[in-house]
Amino acid sequence: MEQRDFFDSIAKEWDNIIEVNEEKINTLLSKVDIKDNDNILDVGTGTGVLIPFLKNLNTKGIIKGVDISSGMLDIASQKFKDTKNVSFEALDIENSSLEEKYDKIILYSMFPHLKNKTNTIKILVENNLNKDGKLIIAHSNSREFLNNMHKEKDKSVSEDRLIPIKDQKTLFEQVNLNVLDAYEDDEIYYLVVNKK
């Protein structure tokens, strides 16, 4: 099973099987200073879990959610069909190019699923992040929890891992990315990158 097929297969149950911890999500989003009128790219949006949080912080700006799973996006599109300035697009961020530039790029609960993590982030920062913009990789669970959970899933995601935050920071810095903040504990994991 391909990764896309796996996420399509669980799309209908997704909102019932995930935990949405509002406090953690708001803490993570606070790290990138979202302002009204920001253009935001939600990479790996799934069923649009972050959309209500992003709209709350950014009532007038444009929010675009992209995902490889059309099954997930069908649900997101239905849930937010009456929400202004929100759009969704089926897109493999690693094998497609985006033309638009954004003030904030958010990868929430999806970074381990990238095959070429460092290069994908470098391209997003260089090509799609506005000057003074910020990109965040964010997880509202610990690295250990997520790695153990993926190990138990379908083989299309069983090898998808987070590495220690200091190692990930070093990998980014080796390709000249500017890491503003990197933190992990037994509750959350995040890195914030901006444009040099």
Image (cartoon, grey):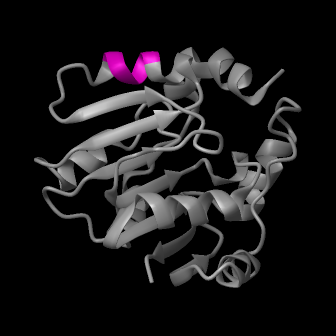
**Residue drawn at (66%, 25%), measured in percent from left and top?**
7
The quarter of the picture where residue 32 lies is: bottom left
User: Is 44 inside the magenta-drawn segment?
Assistant: no
Question: Is 106 left, or right, of 96 in this rendering?
Answer: left
Between 21 and 52, the residue placed more toward the observer is 52
**Residue drawn at (54%, 62%), measured in percent from left and top?**
137
The total of numbered circles placed on residues is: 0
Q: Is residue 174 above or below residue 35?
A: below
The N terminus, quarter of image = top right
Query: Can you give x and y, in whole percent of width and height, for residue 40 in the image?
Result: 31, 52
Question: Is 164 left, or right, of 15 in this rendering?
Answer: right
**Residue drawn at (63%, 56%), measured in percent from left and top?**
120
Between 23 and 80, the residue placed more toward the observer is 80
* Residues drawn in magenta: 74-78
Secondary structure mainly formed by the magenta segment: helix
**Residue drawn at (86%, 38%), measured in percent from left and top?**
152
Whether residue 136 is visible here, answered yes or no, is no
Query: Can you give x and y, in whole percent of width and height, for residue 37 in the image?
Result: 14, 55
The C terminus, quarter of image = bottom left
Between 133 and 3, the residue placed more toward the observer is 133
Query: Can you give x and y, in whole percent of width and height, for residue 103 in the image?
Result: 30, 62
The quarter of the picture where residue 162 lies is: bottom right
